[in-house]
């Protein structure tokens, strides 16, 4: 094919791990001011899939997901990840995070997460940021990959992403008319 195909805009999401509700709310408000209004917010989910964050953040951790109303270009993921890192540092007394922020995006085909850690299945984007496809959408549902984190394999998380994907598809229809 001699023609370039450019991607549709994507819906940015954030996964949070935290124990302090007030800090989570402050980070969420800051992201809304700097990025876009939140259009979806999941219920609190106990985060007990790993003890990886416990030493730094304590016990009784909560997971929550949000999505943003403004569709963006996928290449904005680097800027978004860098903003989230800055916020994590700002809300880290004694250099210990109290809120972990996992930014990413979804489109009709997949859920992508940003990270600063290289690994065999991750692609380098720019400025120390990598991306990985965490879930793929096929046959009407989200499917795991060999590298999908255990918590992202759960029906509970996949239902949240299905709901956000539905909002995303409505947003795409609205954007076509512009």
Image: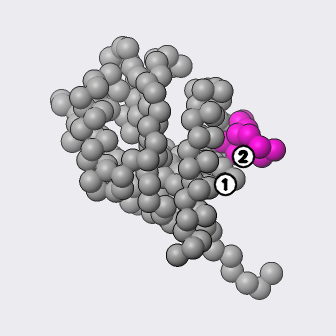
Please indicate, yes or no, whether residue 128 appears anywhere in the rendered image.
Answer: no
Q: Which mark is residue 23?
A: none
Image: 151 above or below 30 = above
Q: Residues within 10 Å of mark 2 (few under 14, many from 20)?
A: some
Q: CA distance from mark 2 to mark 1?
A: 7 Å
Marks 2/1 in contact by CB < 8 Å: the verdict is yes
Q: Return the x and y of residue 60 as percentages of the image width and height.
A: 37, 14
Tell me the magenta residue range. 135-146
Q: Return the x and y of residue 41 as percentages of the image width and height.
A: 44, 37
Q: Return the x and y of residue 75 as percentages of the image width and height.
A: 50, 65
Residue 20 sits in quarter: top left
Residue at horizontal 38 percent and vertical 60 percent from the top: 79
Q: Return the x and y of residue 109 as percentages of the image width and height.
A: 69, 53
Residue at horizontal 56 percent and vertical 50 percent from the top: 167
Q: Which residue is mark 1?
A: 108
The answer to which of 79 and 161 lies nearer the viewer is 161
Asked if residue 140 lies left or right of residue 27, the reply is right
Q: Which residue is mark 2?
A: 137
Secondary structure, mark 2, is strand
Residue at horizontal 63 percent and vertical 34 percent from the top: 158
């Amino acid at each position: 094919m001699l023609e370039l195909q450019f991607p549709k805009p994507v819906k940015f999401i954030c996964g949070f791990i935290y124990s302090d509700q007030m800090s989570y709310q402050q980070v969420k408000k800051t992201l809304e001011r700097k990025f876009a209004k939140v259009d979806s917010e999941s219920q609190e989910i106990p985060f007990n899939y790993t003890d990886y964050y416990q030493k730094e953040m304590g016990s009784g951790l909560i997971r929550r997901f949000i999505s943003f109303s403004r569709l963006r270009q996928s290449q904005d993921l680097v800027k978004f990840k860098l903003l989230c890192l800055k916020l994590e540092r700002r809300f880290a007394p004694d250099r210990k995070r109290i809120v972990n922020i996992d930014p990413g995006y979804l489109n009709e085909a997949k859920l992508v997460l940003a990270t600063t850690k290289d690994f065999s299945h991750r692609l380098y984007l720019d400025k120390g940021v990598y991306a990985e496809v965490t879930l793929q959408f096929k046959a009407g549902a989200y499917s795991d990959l060999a590298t999908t984190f255990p918590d992202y394999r759960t029906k509970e998380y996949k239902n949240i992403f299905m709901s956000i994907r539905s909002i995303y598809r409505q947003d795409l229809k609205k954007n076509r008319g512009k």
